[in-house]
Amino acid sequence: MILIKNIYLIQAGELFEEGNRKGAYFPYSVGAIAAYAWDDEAIKSEYSLENFIFYRQNMREVIDSLNRPFLVGFSNFIWNDVYNRTLAKKIKEAFPECFILFGGHQIPDDGSLLNECSYIDFLIHGEGEIAFKALLLTLANDRGLSDVPGLSYRDNNGGTISNPRQRINALDFPSPYLTGMFDSLIADKSFRFIALVETNRGCPYGCAYCDSIREPLHTLRLFPLQRVFEELEWIARHGIEYCLCVDSNFGICQRDEQIVDYVVDIRKKTGYPSIFNSAFTKEKDNSVFRMVKKLKSAGLLKEFTLSFQSLSDEVLKNIGRKNMSIESFSELMGQYNKADIFPYTELILGLPGETYDSFKEGFEKLIEAGQIFYVEVFRCDVLMNSPMANKNYIKKHGIKTVMTPANLHHYKPDIHHEIAGYSRIVIATDTMKEDMWIRANLFAMFIQSMFYMGPLRFVSMYLFKEKQIKYIRFFEDLMEWSQTRTETVCGKIYKQFEEIYHTFSQEGAAPVYYNPVFGEVTWFAEEGAFLETVYNFDVFYKEMELFLEPYKIEQSILKDLLIFQKNMVNTPGKRHIAFDLEYDLIDYFALTNANEHRPPKKANNSIRFKNNLRYDNWSDYARFAVWYGRKIGRPYFSDRNSEILVEYPADSFVRERGFL
């Protein structure tokens, strides 16, 4: 009688709230290698795939669920590395004969992890389908391991051997969705799953901060189009609402527009998926605009980014990246604006060659080019297998890092995160020392929370247009004013987050904000600063009257400007808003947002609008307006979320006005 060998595969992610059910990602990476392996009859006869562990379960429960495990495979990422190591060690202690296999992005390119972790038996480097299948066949036949491509293992003397990788040219692997790998998961109705879809692998670019440029990933390879179509049909058939395309540069291939058309058609026929998100290619191409427009029209587009990472030529040279020109970006922003599509932009703080001034100037260039919707700032994470992690690169650019718990935002503050994973964050380079790195974080926080989320959005726009006060000067002025007035709302925010960033740079403590008023969840700094501002709404605007005095705004327009600014910020409980102005500011800011200019004209008007995004308590407001909505303009009013009417008594008519 042949004793079947039991295999368990672990891709432990986070769970998140989705109403009465828990949300989770399908364990796509381990599902993909399993689909290829169990397509082989020899493996089917030798092995049983017992279970996928797709979230960070209690370790004792995991171990108790294992039945004579022959091999347990772990997919390693930043956010589960420590969890995986801890669980793997416990499994080895409970089942000494069980093989432990690690693969994924968060293992070094060599076999050094085997020396560090005695409980790990094998490492698979790079793409895992062929190597995993070969390893199972080798272990089933008790053959030597030297023919398993991309495998690291120990020899008989305890030394480490790493086999060469095999280049994979054709992605003719079976799909984990279509082969039934996830059928048992989808049957559990206590979970709502997010589907991950690959249409290609690889990236033709060579950004130093990215770990996806190693061969063979540097070469773009395509999955069969029919497989992609059938996976999308499977997703719709099973009522999966959220589909995330994990291509590095979706839209880079001509056929990608066919994929968008297919998604749109399926959505029309079935109602699923509800959302199709992807990271679009950064190249200027009208086809990307067409694709985004189609997704938006079909209601499939949740958010869309036009990434820069940095606008400094020196930084771009150091990281091997090339951006579109700011002129092309401005042209694109105009296109998207006219199509009622509002992309946000990504920057990375801490890249080599960036200075405090160049970082600030990047914001200025983006806003002046039309990026008035949102800018997301990521802290530079030195990924294990990226060119930036090379010792010579680090030495050349004077990079200093700190280890910090990964992914601690938007989670309950009492969750024990020591078993999650750690990120290696850049806190200084030879062009931006620690003190300026802290100040750059604070600057980003102020401009994100005060401009992009709304509390000083219209005031700063007015000063830019009428007084030629650059945005970076305005928010630098606000920071300096806050530093010396610690008793004010902004002063308290500045002091609180300066301490948070200082502790982060010294100890790696997570830079999160928490206040139970806004729910049992942690927040990004910019979210926390915004929430503190609107929670102290009236006091904040009273203090802003003092801050604005040096700008010498004419009193009548200042009065209207502050009335307008305060009323345009959404806060809990706001339903029907009505106020009177002497100046036609709706018209003024509508033109400003369209990159046109005409000084505010006097015209008595009454503005009223119905708030279509009402929140009756601080917890719901924080979650839906700030967490879910900060990139799409929910913290302030616009015709995207409200019905705005303007009445001009002198003209005796009411008109509905486009605003953003």
Image (cartoon, rainbow, N blue to C red):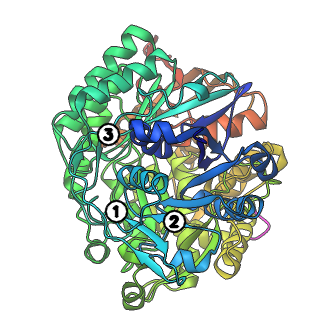
Whether label 1 touches label 2, CB < 8 Å: no
Q: Which residues are magenta?
A: 484-488
> Which label sits on residue 132?
none
- For the residue pair 463 and 109, the one nearer the viewer reads as 109
Q: Is residue 487 magenta?
A: yes
Residue type indicated by callout 2 = Phe
The residue that disc 1 covers is 149
Q: Residues within 10 Å of mark 1 (few under 14, many from 20)?
A: many
Q: Residue at x 71, y 57 (%)?
A: 543
Q: Sequence-wise, which precedes: disc 3 or disc 1?
A: 1
Q: Sequence-wise, which precedes: disc 3 or disc 2?
A: 2
Q: CA distance from mark 1 to mark 2?
A: 12 Å
The residue that disc 2 covers is 122
Element type at marker 3? Answer: loop
Q: Is residue 162 magenta?
A: no
Q: CA distance from mark 3 to mark 1?
A: 17 Å
Q: Position of 129 compared to 200: left or right?
A: right
Residue type indicated by callout 1 = Pro
- Residue 68 on image: x %, y %: 70, 47
Residue 469 seen in the current view: no
The residue that disc 3 covers is 173
